[in-house]
Image (spheres, rainbow, N blue to C red):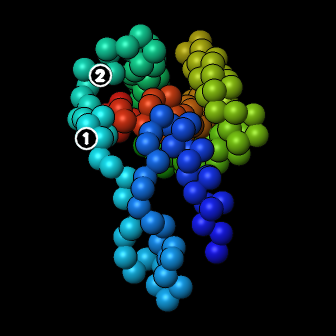
Amino acid sequence: KNYSKARRVYRKIAETNNREMFSSRLIGEGDPNDSFGSKLRAVMPRDDSQSRKYSTVDLFRYASTRGKIIFSMLLWFTCALTYFGLMFQLPNLSDDPDAIYENGIIMGVGETIGVFSAGIFADKFGRRSVLTGSLVSSGMACLVFLFSDEKFFTLIGIAVGKCLISGAFGVAFVYTPELFPTVVRSTAIG
């Protein structure tokens, strides 16, 4: 057991984070019969900044988080409005009341493809570029749906738009928390 090497690593971490190095013994240090985890010996001193409570006001206090929270609000509003707007157009696609089930299956398959492909592409090309691409492409698909007179092109426009906006939703769930510092992350998402 190389405790001096562990202490050097802890010292470097403490210096990087502007913290004091703890003075306690490491678990198992100096006692060869002590099992790992039997006693808690490495306790860092509690600091007032660690116990501070953060609120929604802290998101708007600094310009860096203020811009990010406004962007996130706009992103989530756009995704939700587009997703549910396309979903509510489903009954209007056909005069046949039984066609709603066929159209629903098409939408469900498109949505599944969109979420899985967005996840794969986000790992390969980055979350920001996939999110931007899927939002812009979904908007273009909605324009096809909006200006089309034929039911077939309308259905294709809605299916592609739903596929892409579902992918954007999936990426937004992962990307949005990464924008904020850890101390306000749950507040920003909530």
What x and y, as percent, mark residue 122?
68, 38
Disc 2 packing (10 Å; few <14; some 14–19; many ≥20):
some
- The picture places residue 30, in percent across and down from the top left corner, at 51, 77
Q: Residue furthest right?
A: 124
Q: Is 147 or 24 nearer to us in this picture?
A: 24
Residue found 47% across the figure and 48% down from its top: 21
Q: Is residue 91 above or below residue 61?
A: below
The spot of residue 42 in percent (x, y) is 41, 62
Q: Is residue 153 above or below residue 4?
A: above
Q: Quadrant of residue 59?
A: top left
- Would you name the residue on which mark 2 appears? 58
For the point 48% across and 34% down, the residue is: 18
Which dot, 2 or 1, sits closer to the camera?
1
Residue drawn 41% across the image and 61% down it = 24
Q: Of the two numbered discs 2 and 1 on the same chain, state the one appearing first in sequence.
A: 1
Secondary structure category for the residue under label 1: loop
Residue 153 pos. (x, y %): 65, 26
Whether residue 20 is visible to the viewer of this picture, yes or no, is yes
The one nearer the camera, 185 or 120, is 185
Q: Residue 72 is drawn in which quadrant? A: top left
CA gap between label 2 and label 1 equals 15 Å
Please identify the quadrant where the C terminus is shown.
Answer: top left
Q: Give residue 133's mark.
A: none
Please name whichever residue, 157 or 5, is drawn nearer the observer in this view of the structure. Answer: 5
Q: Residue at the spot x=62%, y=53% of the render?
A: 8
Q: Quadrant of residue 182?
A: top left
Q: Could you say whether the residue bearing mark 2 is in a helix, strand or loop?
A: helix
Question: Which residue is the extreme one toward the bottom?
Answer: 33
Q: From the image, tell me which residue sits under label 1.
A: 51
Q: Toward the viewer: 74 or 30?
A: 30
Q: Amino acid at mark 1?
A: Ser
- In the image, is residue 88 above or below residue 7? above
